[in-house]
Each structure stands twice: as structure tokens, then as C-alpha cells.
Image (cartoon, grey):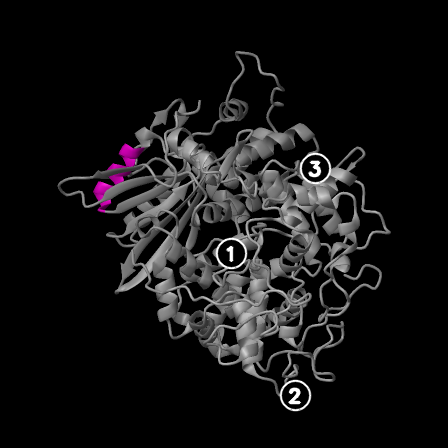
Amino acid sequence: MRPRLFVTLSTAVVMSTTLPARAAGTVEFERITLDEGNVTAFLEATSQHYVDAMRALINERYRDEYRAIRWEALEEAMRGASVARLEYHFTVNGFPNVRVYHAMGGRSLSSIAQSIFEGPTRPGTPDSPLSPTDFDDESESAATKLPVIEEAAVDLADSRFYMGFGDVGVRAPVMARGSSVLDAFVVAEKDRLFDPEFKALRSIEKDLQDQVVPRGGSIRGSVSELVCTSCEGAMKRFSETYAIDIRLSHLYPSMRGAGLDELVASGKARLRGSLLVDATTDRPLLASDLLHGAREGQIRRSLSPRAMGRSFKRMPWSRRSFRLNPIRLPRLSEGSSEGSPPSRPRTPKDPATGC
Amino acid sequence: MVRWPLALATASFVVGGGNAYATNTVGVDVFSHLQRERIARVGDEPLPRAQDPLVDQLLIEPSSPYSATRADPAFTNDVEWPEVLAQLPGRLSSGEAVAVLHWDLGLTRARPGQDILPRDGFRDPFVGASATKADVDADIFWHMVDLTGFRHSTKAATYAVAMQILRRQLLESDPGRQASLGIDGEVFRRVMKAVHLDQVTTYDMEYLATLVQHRLIHWQVGDRATTGARALPTVFRVARVAAAYRDAQGYLNGYPCNPAATPRVGTAGTGAEEDDRPLCFVAATDRAVHRWYVDESDRQARWVPEREADGIGRLAGFLSAVLVLLDLAPIVEMFEAVAADDLVTAKLFTSTEADVAAERADRLFCPLPE
């Protein structure tokens, strides 16, 4: 179901709530429509962590899985999962510090992969009127739902598939219900415990409780989808309890109304099918569209049958021989550490291939 | 949020003059249009063997790093070329469209006074020409190499470009919305205030690396640089800044350029596989400078003095991803794949067509280890 959209160009709809009494925190949401600043870049980078981890998981557990329809389901699941990137800014001994929490919505990667590769084949199209209309529902029904506490354990065990996180950038996993002001609740049959922004906030809360980070900081970040209205209440409680300002940007998936009319009338943009594009360059203008396309590209480059080196009949697939996404290389400490700079490297090459 | 009271520097570009120029055409992506036309024409069939690669048609001497550009490449005689031109916005002439291709594909040079009018503050016209073409301000340019030293100047180049991107975002966005848009002025302030690399936080390094990486993996051309000319693709901006640092460092075996910005015979590198000598950078094409950059960044990454292991080690860790991405010698083919991916986002290509572009590049790259 798509929400009705009311947005004006470059004028974000800011819903600001200042909390009273002991609540020192403020919660602000800004809807991002056009691709401005670095929101898309940061969310794309967050998404890449999860695509890479899923690739590692599949390589280990489902290497011989060939059925194309399962790959389609995988692509759809990864593309449809929302992502969030929240920064906790705080001060230690007068020096500013930041810890970044990355999260992807949904259950653990193991559970997602299991539901796709081990569950029953998902139905084809067209759906009957009684078919599930949302892939989440569908995948949920196909999967064996684990209790949250077990899901959290599975997610924790998946940590070995994730590369690139460290002390500053951390993954926000599924967490079992516990001493949290972020009451888990179900909205539209969806457990918000699995929303990426809640995973991230819960991780921040745990770090606050464990004194990994001090109180009194502020949170800013972005989410790839709209934050549900009822979720805002939980965030206000969080802000109030820990005296933390929260400022979240969430991507608004469309543009309608006066803002759109004005943009089109000015000749700067036009509608091409469902896309709002730059009238001159044809480039999509909405942050949501660009992020969606970028994530599709990540999946195509890392998780498609071609990328995974699968071979279907008469359809050779091979992974690209170059990467368009950040990868992790051996740390510098694994190289030389003393003496003078080495001479210019000349790696021996195979004369036949030039490699 | 602090808004930095730093005015964007301005510079003039010398336009015209044979094949040497900086194009001022903005807001158009000729390469993507050409690619779309080609895919529409040949589909997923490989290009005819008789057809020279695009770059070979655009350069007079493709094997030379110092080649001039060709104003009337063979493909402009194809019957499809007028159709490509007709689809471009702004009624570009054939010459203007070809000039945009020269610029975006890294085929232009940076000779001071001929291709580029250097900005002030770089202490040397050759250094200034490369840095000006990269659109990096002098204060950022010198500060970043102060932090890393010339021994790690290729990394300084990446961060210098990132800092310039951030500065421009700070100048051109509403201060009230910068936090929501992920534009962090504090990062800029902290980095510019640091006197040693250890004072630059891991967060700041990651932040800046992400700004550059995003622009490396997406084909975003056609913006206007602060100089007024068309902005150079990010991959060449980084390489040009690194070249400027190399020129600023000086040469023990003699400067590789003559005063007239031509390569000094016997001293300047030829770009050949076994030739380690530095290029006369201002006389070299962006593409040739990028090839040098790949080797140089690899060489620098292998050396970490013990006393610098902390700051430099962290620096190398975050930049490794960028360096790998840049380590792509057949860069035009990579551009094709990058542009194709973004054309899928724009729903102008199918994913199959993007794969065709990727396969064409695949044939030119060595397999990646898992």
C-alpha cells in the first residue's frame, strides 16, 4: 500500500517534536525526496555490507543451488529490505567521537537464505486475489519463523560473514527483547523489531547501557524507507529516556503535487514512465529511485547467477572481472613495514592472458 | 551548523586552440548517448573487429601518453552520429560533442597557458595546472600533503578531492539542512585543523572515502567545476592531484618537462611497460596520468615506516577499496560498464544490456581473486 504523498520540491516536511520536562531530547524527521547531499551514498555503502555478507554466506552454504527462481527470490529479498545508517555523536574528554550503526531490515541473513533456498518454491505470477501481496509476508510464511531470541542468536552467528565493520562502523543485529525502552510492537502484522532503524537504535541503547558510549550525545542518520508513524513514539521515548537528540532522514519514494508540477513546469524535470528524471540528462532525480537502482546494481554485480559463477543451459554466467564496489584488501600491516620504499612493482604476467 | 566563509575560487580557462582545450559544455552526457546508440544498433553482438576502439579514434597517437586529440574521429562519419547529436540536449555541434568525449574519457592534457590557466597558490605553474584541472583549492591541496607527506601523496590526492567535494557541498547547500543531508561540516573543520594524520579520526577518513567512492562507482558527468569548465570525472581528478604532488616534490634526475610543457626527451617517461621514469604530467593525457597513478599508489601503499604505522596504516586501510577501484587500466571499458549500470537505474538499459557492457570490459581485465 502506498501512502499518499505530499511534498514540495526541496522543502522537506519536518515533523519536530520537542519533549517536555526531563526529556532533553528532540526527535526530528526529514523527508528526502530529491537526491541531495550524501544520504544516497551512505545508504548505498551500508547496503553493500549486507550484499557482500550474503554472497559469503551463499558461497559457503548454497554453492550448488541452481534453480533460477530461487535466485530471483534472493534478489527480490535483498532489494526489498530497507537499510538504515545511524551515527551516534558523543564527546569523550572534550574530543568528539562518532560511532556508526548499520542495519538492514528483516531477519538474519541465514534465515533469509534458508527461507529462499530450503523453503517451498514461491508462487509464480499473476497472483490470485488470495495470494500474498507482499514478499515479506510470503517469505515469512515460507520460512520457519524462529522465536526472536533464537533469531538473535542466528544473527549473531552470521557475524563472521560480515567484513568491513570495526570499532567505528558496527553492525546492528537483531536483538532479543530485554531491558529496552523501544517496546517491540507489531504494526500491520509486521514486527517492528526487525526494522533497520529499530535495530540500530537498540544497538545504541545497548551500548549506552553497557557504557560502551557515554550518554548525552546525539543521533543523526538516514533510513531508506519512510519511518512508520507509530514508530515515532518509540523514538520519542528513547530520546526522552537517554536525553538524546535524534534527527533522522527518511527517503520519500515519490513526488506529487505542487512541487512536482513546479519542477516539471520549470523545464528542469520530466516524468518518464514512473521515473522523475532530469530533463537534460535523463538521470533520475529522486533519492529513492537512485538508491533502489544502486542496490539493484550491487545485487546484479555480487549476487546474480552471473556474479556467483553459475551456469544455466546455454546461458554462460561468470562474475565480472572487475569490481564496482568497495572491497576489503589485506591490511597494510601485512605488507612491508621497514626500510626504504620498494621499487615500482612489476607483477609477473602470463604472456597469454596478460594477467 | 557552521557555514564556512570560504569563497569558491574562480579561474579562467583557455578555450580553443587546435585540439587543446577545456570544454565548457555542461549538462550533457555524450558518452552514455553514444553507448545507448551503439547498443541499440549492435545489440549484444560484439563490435566488428574492423572498428577501432573508441579511444583509438579519438587520439592522434593512441599509444603515446602525450597524444593530441583528434577533432574529427572516424565515428563522426557514421550515419548514426547525426542521430546521436540530435538526441543530445543543447544542440551541440559535432565538434562540441567530441570535445566532451575527449574530456570525459581522459584524453585531454593540462599544459599551463594552453589547456589550463593555473590558479594562484600552487607556487608553480605546472603544479597549479594539474591541481586546477582537478578543481582542488590550494589550501586543501597543501594541507592534505602536509598531513601525509609526499611519500603517501597518492592517498593525500584522494582525500584532497574528497575535501573539495565536501567544501562545495557546504557552500552550495542550505546550512539548516546539511545534517539531514549527511553533509558534515565538522569533518571538514576537523581535518583542516589537524596537524598530524593521527588527529584525523577514523570516522572522518571513512566519511571522506565514501564521498569519493560513491563518485567512482557511478557515472556522474556533466557538472560544472568551480573553474567554470566542465568537471573532470573523479577518477581523473584524483590522478591529476597526485601528479601535481609529484611535480611539487621535485625530481632528482631532472624535471621531465621542458619549459614549454613538452616532454623532455631522455628524461620524461614514455608510458611503456618497463619505463619507470615519471611522465611530463602536464603534457600527458588524464588517462596516461591515471595509469601512472595506479602504479604509484601501489608503490606507496607498500611502504609504511614503523613510526607512522598508526595514522598511515589507518589511511591505507580505508583507501584500499578506492585504490582497487582505480586499478583499472582499460578505463574506458570500465566507464562503459559503470555508465550501463546507471542507465539501468534510469530505465534506459535493461540489466541484460548492462551485462553486455560488463562482458566487453571483462575481456580486458584479469580475473579477480575471491
List x then y, in percent, for residue A232: 30, 34
Q: Image quarter for residue A68?
A: top right
Where does the N terminus of chain A fall, quadrant-wise? top left
Cα distance in 3D space between marks 2 and 3: 51 Å
Residue at which label 2 appears: B253
List x then y, in percent, for residue A122: 60, 22
Span of residues in magenta: A232-243
Residue at which label 1 appears: B224
Which tag, 2 or 3, sits closer to the chain's start?
A: 2
Cα distance in 3D space between marks 1 and 3: 32 Å
List x then y, in percent, for residue B185: 35, 58
Farthest-out residue, top: A129
How packed mark 1 is, by other alpha carbons closer than 10 Å (few <14, some 14-19, many 20 or more), is some
Is residue A283 visible in this depiction of the protein?
Answer: yes
Q: Could you tell me which residue is drawn at 54 percent across and 60 percent down?
A: B229
**Chain containing the residue with disc 1:** B
Q: Could you tell me which residue is drawn at 69 percent across and 48 percent down?
A: A320
